[in-house]
């Protein structure tokens, strides 16, 4: 396994630059992904927040659907990224995701998220955020907002309904890179 | 416990729109076309800027019926315009739960000296600018997103380019100044000192910066992105063209793949007539919208 992890960020639309900045800060080598061939050689991939309908359309037009489904490495989706990973889109995460489930922008908010195995809560920024309406038996809850799941993991897939890339707290991205390292050992 | 309407939450929505296209729409069927084409948001209007320009008269906030119709038609964010300084139009738009308010020079200004105090609102605002000082004054008043103005309703990109060159060029110049030169610089820019310092240190505006005014083709959108815009607003350029759906899709793709000339060539092909347009340089000064705002 290489010393430096090579992480892709799906960059068709949305908040990809901020994810890339956090990942670089944590020592990863980051590549922007807009076309299928750019998935080659990546250890992991982030699907950022943005407008899920716009991202979905650009994923369809440039034939990224199937390559994303075939991608073997760990995936981390935030907000729109969680929607894309869920049952109704790529189907890689066994979660039914309800879009804009907290309401319009005036209902967007920041609040403490309780992380599994960590006593210090994390500030979650929720922007027209989706909700986990239902999760399958293989889905573990790693973060909760007032008891409700907002950070979930199923094997190599991690998904958040909030935006860890909008705060200076890097704990969620660190967990993702840890997951990438563990999966790398398993696959190698 | 949950905090609403913080600057992080307001500017956060703009962060999610980056790399995207925000389209002017005047009814639910246009809104659905925009959404299907991949727009990241729509701007709900009664008339697009080209028609406001052609018809004249006082241009005001849209009728709430229009805004609600468009909100019901799509799931992407819906923005709407208030007149410069018309804080009651803004209060009404907030009550309608629009996702962003554009305090816009495209409408007839309601106040010749003051813009809306945007800090008091939970809904975020986007404002236009022609240069760095204007951008920082708007951010000082609480704008959570900036767009360069261009000249709306012309289909002529030249003013948008001038405004982007001004904003991004002034930022590059600030970066080279010494700390003790920033006081005089802030005075010259007529902008808050703390914001001038922030920009000099970070080399960008503290909020997402889109381009507006005159974008009519995929090449125009990609030009704005290559010049440093975070995304584009397209007003009259889509629904004043011969084939709005094809053009809307092409502009969306050009905004994502802005640095890939082969994709730009493909998406620019066979779109039919663009909007007819007006030469912005030939407009008499009293017809310019860009000079509204202080």
Image (cartoon, helix red, strand yellow):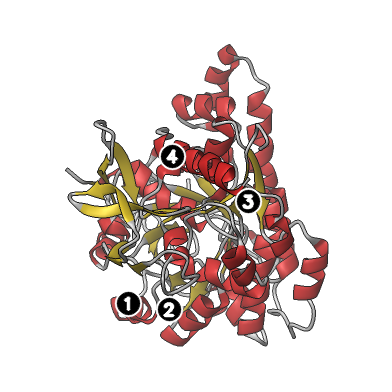
Residue drawn at 35 percent across, 62 percent down: B99
Q: Position of residue B44 (x, y in %)?
A: 42, 73
Q: Position of residue A97 (x, y in %)?
A: 35, 67
**Picture layout, residue B212 above or below residue B27:** above
Question: Chain under label 3?
Answer: B
Which sits earlier in the primary sequence, circle 3 or circle 2? 2
Residue identifier under label 1: B63
Check if mark 3 and mark 1 are on a common chain. yes
**Picture layout, residue A40 above or below residue B220:** above
Image-based side of A54 in relation to B98, left or right: right
Which sits earlier in the primary sequence, circle 1 or circle 2? 2
Residue identifier under label 2: B46
Residue identifier under label 3: B229
How far, Cα to Cα, is label 3 from label 1? 31 Å
Q: Nearer the viewer, residue B17 or A147?
A: A147
Label 1 Cα crowd, 10 Å radius (few <14 / some 14-19 / many 20+): few
Q: Are marks 1 and 2 in contact (CB under 8 Å)?
A: yes
Image-based side of A3 in relation to B201, left or right: right
Task: Assign a secondary structure to mark 4.
Answer: helix
- The image quadrant where one finds the N terminus of chain A is top right
Task: Assign a secondary structure to mark 2.
Answer: loop
Residue identifier under label 4: A175
């Amino acid at each position: 396994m290489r010393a430096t992890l090579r992480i892709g960020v799906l960059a068709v639309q949305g908040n990809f630059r901020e994810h890339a900045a956090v990942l670089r800060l944590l020592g990863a080598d980051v590549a922007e992904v807009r076309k299928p061939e750019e998935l080659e050689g990546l250890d992991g991939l982030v699907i950022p927040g943005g407008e899920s309908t716009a991202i979905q359309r650009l994923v369809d037009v440039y034939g990224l659907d199937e390559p994303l489904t075939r991608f073997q490495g760990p995936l981390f989706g935030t907000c729109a990224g969680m929607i894309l990973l869920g049952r109704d889109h790529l189907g890689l995460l066994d979660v039914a995701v309800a879009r804009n489930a907290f309401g319009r922008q005036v209902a967007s908010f920041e609040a403490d998220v309780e992380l599994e195995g960590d006593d210090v809560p994390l500030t979650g920024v929720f922007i027209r955020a989706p909700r986990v309406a239902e999760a399958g038996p293989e889905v573990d809850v790693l973060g909760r907002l007032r008891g409700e799941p907002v950070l979930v993991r199923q094997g190599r897939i991690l998904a958040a309904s909030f935006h860890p890339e909008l705060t200076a707290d890097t704990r969620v991205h660190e967990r993702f890179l840890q997951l990438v390292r563990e999966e790398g050992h398993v696959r190698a | 416990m949950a905090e609403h309407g913080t600057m992080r939450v307001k500017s956060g929505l703009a962060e999610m729109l980056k790399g995207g296209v925000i389209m002017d729409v005047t009814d639910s069927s246009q809104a659905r076309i925009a959404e299907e084409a991949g727009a990241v948001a729509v701007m709900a209007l009664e008339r697009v800027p080209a028609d406001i320009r052609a018809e004249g008269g006082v241009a005001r906030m849209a009728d709430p019926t229009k805004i609600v119709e468009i909100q019901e038609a799509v799931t992407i964010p819906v923005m709407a315009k208030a007149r410069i300084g018309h804080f009651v139009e803004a209060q009404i738009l907030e009550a309608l739960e629009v996702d962003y308010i554009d305090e816009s020079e495209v409408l007839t200004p309601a106040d010749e000296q003051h813009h809306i105090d945007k800090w008091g609102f939970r809904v975020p605002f986007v404002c236009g600018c022609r240069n760095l000082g204007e951008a920082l004054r708007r951010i000082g008043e609480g704008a959570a997103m900036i767009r360069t103005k261009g000249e709306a309703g012309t289909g002529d990109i030249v003013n948008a380019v001038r405004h982007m060159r001004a904003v991004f060029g002034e930022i590059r110049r600030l970066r080279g100044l010494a700390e003790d030169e920033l006081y005089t610089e802030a005075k010259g820019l007529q902008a808050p000192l703390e914001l001038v310092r922030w920009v000099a240190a970070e080399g960008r505006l503290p909020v997402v910066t889109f381009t507006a005014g005159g974008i009519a083709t995929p090449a125009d959108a990609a030009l704005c992105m290559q010049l440093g815009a975070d995304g584009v607003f397209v007003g009259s350029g889509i629904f004043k063209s011969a084939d709005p759906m094809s053009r809307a899709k092409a502009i969306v793709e050009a905004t994502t793949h802005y640095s890939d000339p082969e994709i730009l060539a493909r998406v620019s092909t066979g779109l039919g007539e663009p909007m007819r347009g007006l030469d912005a340089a030939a407009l008499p000064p009293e017809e310019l919208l860009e000079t509204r705002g202080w």
